[in-house]
Amino acid sequence: MRYREFVLSPYGVIKIKSLGYIEYRPAQAELKQEPGHFEIDTIFGKDQKSFLLTIVDNALKTVIIRKLPNKRAETVVAAFRDIEANTFCKFKTLTADNGPEFALHEQITQITGAQVYFAHPYHSWERGLNEHTNGLIRRFYTKGTDFSQVSHRKIAELEHILNTRGRKSLGYRSPNEVFLTHLQAA
């Protein structure tokens, strides 16, 4: 196992135990045909004091958005507990950037059953779908938005908009339509 250092504050450093970079991810995740392979990230709000956790399925393009009061790793773990308890998502893999908010990835794996993989530092294109999704979210909430002032209902409405709009990559079907097709096939 390799360790990577991340500066949390001017007063200390944590080490994230990493099970592997993105190249160790199963080939199925790269094909983008099988649901359950997700990319995860956070979006900063005004003055980096409010945050959104964004999760998007590579195959279905289904988006999950959660408000975070801070960017601490424990907060992200709590958000995954909520997501696991309140969605129908079956997580197989999660691909994150190298942010310290994902330092407790082993706990996220225990909650979701999905192995967490990391993109290489400064290689945001390795999680291109998530970066694109964050851009779509920014069309609704521009940089400088204070997410603590945005209600959970408004975030849920945005999630609904993104999951019900047609996508070219899905043959102009919505992520919800594709998700229902997979549920019916199962």
Image (cartoon, rainbow, N blue to C red):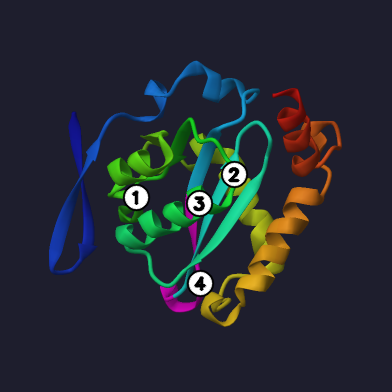
Q: CA distance from mark 4 to mark 1?
A: 18 Å
For mark 3, give the secondary structure.
helix
Q: Which residue is mark 1?
A: 102
| Amino acid on which the number 2 mark rests in the picture | Val
Residue at left offset 32%, top offset 63%: 72
Q: Is residue 44 magenta?
A: yes
Q: Which residue is mark 2?
A: 56
**Which tag is nearer the camera, tag 2 or tag 4?**
2
Marks 2/4 in contact by CB < 8 Å: the verdict is: no
Q: Which residue is mark 3?
A: 85
Tag 1 or tag 4, which sits nearer the N-term? 4
**Which tag is nearer the camera, tag 4 or tag 1?**
1
For mark 1, give the secondary structure.
helix
Left or right: 103, with 10 as reference point:
right
Q: Where 67 sits versus 109, above or below? A: below
Q: Is residue 125 visible?
A: no
Q: Which residue is mark 4?
A: 45
| Amino acid on which the number 1 mark rests in the picture | Phe
Residue at left offset 64%, top offset 49%: 63
Q: Where 112 sits versus 86, above or below? A: above
For mark 4, give the secondary structure.
loop
Tag 3 or tag 1, which sits nearer the N-term? 3
Q: Is residue 87 visible?
A: yes
**Image quarter of residue 61:** top right
Left or right: 77, with 14 as reference point:
right
Q: Where 181 sits versus 64, above or below? A: above
Where is residue 106 shown, x and y percent of the image? 29, 41
In which quadrant is the C terminus drawn?
top right
Residue at left offset 84%, top offset 37%: 173
Q: Is residue 99 magenta?
A: no
Tag 4 or tag 2, which sits nearer the N-term? 4
Q: Nearer the viewer, residue 133 or 144?
A: 133
